[in-house]
Image: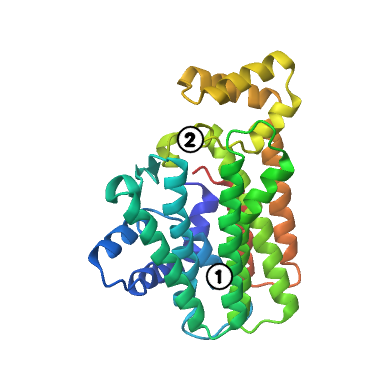
Amino acid sequence: MTDLKRRLLDRIGEDLAAIESALAQNLTPYLDLVSETARYILFSGGKRLRPLLMVLSARLCGYSGKKDKKFSTIFEYLHAATLLHDDLVDGAAVRRGKPVAHSVYGNETAVLVGDFLLARSLSIAAETGLLEVIQAIALITENMSQGEIEQLSKKGSLSLTEADYLQIIENKTAGLIRGACRVGGLVAGASKTQVRRLSDFGYRLGIAFQMADDLLDYVADSRLLGKEVGADLREGKLTLPVIHALSQAEPADRDRMVEIIQGKHFDPADFSDLVRLLDHYGGIAYTREKASGFVGSAKEALSGFEPSTTKKTLMMIADYALARQY
């Protein structure tokens, strides 16, 4: 465990425990199969980043109520719903070190439990009594669906550009993280300026988080990562390290990279060769640099808030988004 992670956990341990409890208490399906499937995806080791960000954002804006943990479940239920659907669409085999839910419970059950979790998130959003919160969750859901469709339509495409990539991760990842921060401000009754700053923080953090996550597919230990290294590539997902390296490579090396990418059934030696080429042509360094820039701008978005323990914690989360190893 890194020193940053240890210090961060010391700060957020109580909040994470309360969020974990709220996730269990507010699930409330009446069918045992729905409960079992939902719990399989919900309690398999998620980081709880999104609900945590909502809780901290509300606290930063002076929230003094008792429902922040309940409201935060909106974002974990919605996130879990997308994982159930995405794993099925992508043909994934492993999630967080375990067999994916649809391989255990069947495709139909996984899809319908995902639908249940989405509906549950909207029901809890309605309990806030704030139209802006309901609108935010609805828009996030629309954009995430479109992001997944866009990614699917461009699956395996070597013509995918950095701009295309950014649009996809904005819809699929950054939008939900931005929404968590925004809703934290809304339930706290924050000013429009504060809500905008939190939204900016969440968006930039979300972009950095996804870029760092995409890097892990090429640099992480699969035992820590919880999925097979190279999984994104096997699923036809071209991410920024590959996109940038392809744009910089000499013809012969580009042909070799394309051969590996399009083969999909590459062996460890092929994958190692690809990682070597990604490193040689700057794909890994470029992605890390871009992610670092978004972390810096995320922290800058919080500059309008007074110094506090909560603000410092959010800053540390931004740093950890880049420094994490899994």
Could you say which quadrant of the image residue 314 lies in? bottom right
Q: Which quarter of the picture shows residue 298?
A: bottom right
The circle on residue 54 is: 1
Q: Earlier in the sequence, mark 1 or mark 2?
A: 1
Using the image, determine if residue 290 lies above or below residue 264: below
- Report the residue marked by disc 2: 231
Classify residue 297 as left or right of residue 284: right
**Residue 258 tag number:** none
Q: Looking at the image, can residue 306 be seen?
A: no
User: Which of 155/308 is in front?
Assistant: 155
Residue 187 shows in this picture: yes
- Closer-to-camera residue (111/28): 111
Residue 282 % position (x, y): 71, 29
Q: Secondary structure at mark 1?
A: helix
In this view, 8 is above or below 69: above
Residue 44, how many percent across, how many down?
35, 53
**At which x and y percent is residue 161?**
72, 38
Q: Residue at x 64, y 73 (%)?
A: 308
Q: Residue at x 72, y 40 (%)?
A: 162
